[in-house]
Amino acid sequence: MAHLALDTQRIARARSSAAHIARQVFDDMSCRTTTTVERATLRLMGIDGVDENAVPLPNRVVAHLQAQGLLASGAATAVAAAMAEHGLSAQAVAQAVAAGQLTLVRPRDETAARSHAKALASQMCEHIAAQRAERSARISRCGEAHTPWLYLIVATGNIYEDIKQARAAAQQGADIVAVIRSTGQSLLDYVPFGATTEGFGGTYATQENFRLMRAALDEVGSQVKRYIRLTNYCSGLCMPEIAAMGAMERLDMMLNDSMYGIIFRDINMQRTFIDQFFSRMVNGYAGIIINTGEDNYLTTADAFDAAHTVLASQLINEQFAYLSGLSPELMGLGHAFEINPNLENGFLWELAHAQLVRQVFPEAALKYMPPTKHMTGNIFRGHVQDALFNMASTLTQQNIHLLGMMTEAIHTPFIQDRFLSIENARYVFHTMRDLHGEIEFKSGGLIETRAQTVLAETEALLAEVQRIGLPAAISRGQFAEIARQPDGGKGLDGVLSKADDYYNPFPELMLPGA
C-alpha cells in the first residue's frame, strides 16, 4: 500500500495526550453510575417487558430502588437478594415490584447477594459469548465480502418494511445493513418494547426489532452466501441498554461515540461518559464493532479547516475504547469525504485525510462516510462525487464504506437509488482493486505535506485538551464548533454517586484482565 512519510514521534505524542485525556475522564467518572447503566444491568440479569402502562420493567425497578435510597449501591444485589429470599426469577421480582407486591430492601447477606448476582451475570455472559461464536461460525460457513464492506441504510419506520428493504439491499450487494432509528429516540430515557411499525424517519431500536432483523439477515445471508452484518444505534440516553440488547441479539456493529451525544444531542457529558464506558464494555465483550461519529463534525465545521479535530477525536475515541476493553479491529473510527468540491485540489486533500487516518490507525476497522453536506440535488454531479469517494476509499484501504446516494438532499433513498450506488461502488472497487499497491505518494508533495500539517495541528490540539481537560475543551466548542457545559444538557438527573458498597458484576466478567 502506498504510504505517506509521517512523523511517528508526533503520532506517539498525540496518542499519549489522548491517553491522558481519556484516563482523566475515566478516573473522574468511575465513582459514579447512571440510571441507564443500572437498567442495562437488570436487562442483562434477565428483566424485560413492560407494565400495564407500557413502562419498561427495568425503569420501574430502578425508579423503585431510587425511591428506596438503594440505587447508589447498584441494582444487582438488591434484586439478587430478593430472588434468593422469595424464590423468584429476576423477571418475577420486577413484576412483583411493578405491581406493588414487593418492596426491595438492602441485602441481609451482602456476600451471598453478590455471589447470586455474579452467577446470573455469568449466565448472560455465556449467552453473549455463544452469540459471538455463532457469528464466527456463520462467517465460516457463508463467507464474507472483501473490504471495503458496502454499508446501506434502511429507514421506513416499520420493522417489517425495513426487513423487506434489507433483504433487497443484501441481494443487490450490501454487506452491512443499518436500521436508522426513529427521530428523537436518542432523547427517550427508556427503550420501547416489542416489534414497532410506526416511526418518524426511522424505526425504533427495540430488542424484538433487533431479533426480527437479525433472523432475516441470517436467512438472506445463507441465500447469497455472504454474512450480512446488522447495525443499529447505541447512543443517546439509553446507550448501555441498547448495547445490552444488541449483545443478546447478535448485532454486529453499533454507532457508539464518546462525544456525539454531548455535542449533537445536548446530552449531559457526565451521563454520556459514564454510559459510553459501560456500553463499550458490553460491545467489546460481544465482538460488536463500534462506529464513532467524527464524520458529523464536518457537517457543522469546514472539512478542510477542521480536519485535525476529526483526527484528535478519533485518537480520544480510541483511548476510551481501550479502557472499555475493545481491541483495534472493533474500532470503527469514523471520518468523511466532506471537503467542498469547489475547493481546488479538494480530492487531493480528501486522499491526504483518508490515508493519514489509515496510517495512524493501521489495525482499526475504519468507517468512511460519503459526501452529504455538499450534495446539491444535481444527481449527475452527485453520482460523480460518490465515484470519487469510492475511489478514495479503495485507494486508502478503508474497511466500512457507507454508500453515497446520488439523491442525497432530495429524498429518502429508493431501492433503485441504492442499486445504482452499489453498482457505482462495485465498479470502482473492482476496476481499482490493487491500484493502492501500484502507486506511491510523491515525497514532499501536496498530499504528504497536507497530511503532515493536519497531524501537527492534531498534536497541538490534543496537547491543549490535555492541559485544560476534555470537559473544558468541549465547553469551549473545540469539537464541531459547538459548546456544551459539564453541568448542562439532558440526563444529568440520571447521574448518581456510587456508595461505598456499590457492586456491579459485569465489569469483572467482561473486561479483559479485570
Image: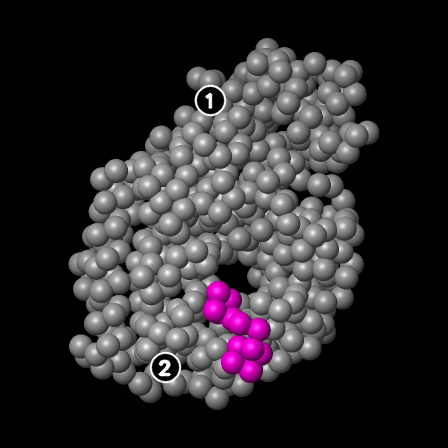
Residue 112 in percent (x, y) is at 57, 19
Secondary structure, magenta segment, majority class: loop
Does residue 84 appear to the left or right of 511 in the view shown? right
Label disc, if present, on residue 486 of the rendered structure: none
Q: CA distance from mark 2 to mark 1?
A: 52 Å
Residue underneath mark 2: 436
- For residue 509, say whether it is visible: no
Which residue is painted at 63% across and 38% down in the image? Answer: 188
Residue 58 locus on image (x, y percent): 67, 31
Which residue is found at the position 45% from the left and 27% from the top? 32
How many marks the image carries: the answer is 2
- In the displayed structure, 141 sits above or below 104; it is below
Q: Position of residue 55 (x, y in %)?
A: 73, 31
Between residues 89 and 417, which one lies in front from this camera angle?
A: 417
Q: Residue at x 77, y 61 (%)?
A: 161
Label 1: few (<14), some or many (≥20) within 10 Å? Answer: some
Given residues 306 and 387, the one toward you in this image is: 306
Q: Is residue 250 left or right of residue 398?
A: right
- The type of residue carrying mark 1 is Lys
- Label 2: state its secondary structure: helix
What residue lies at 50% left-to-right and 49% top-to-bottom?
256
Q: Position of residue 409 (x, y in %)?
A: 58, 67
Pick whichever of labels 2 and 1 is earlier in the sequence: 2
Q: For the residue carrying disc 2, how many other residues have a C-alpha within 10 Å: few (<14), some (14-19), or many (20+)?
A: some
Q: Is residue 288 above or below residue 115?
A: below
Q: Quadrant of the N terminus?
A: bottom left
Question: Residue 377 lies in magenta, yes or no?
Answer: yes
Q: Which residue is mark 1?
A: 498
* Quadrant (top left/top right/bottom left/bottom right) for the C terminus: top left
Q: Provide the residue span drawn in magenta.
A: 369-383
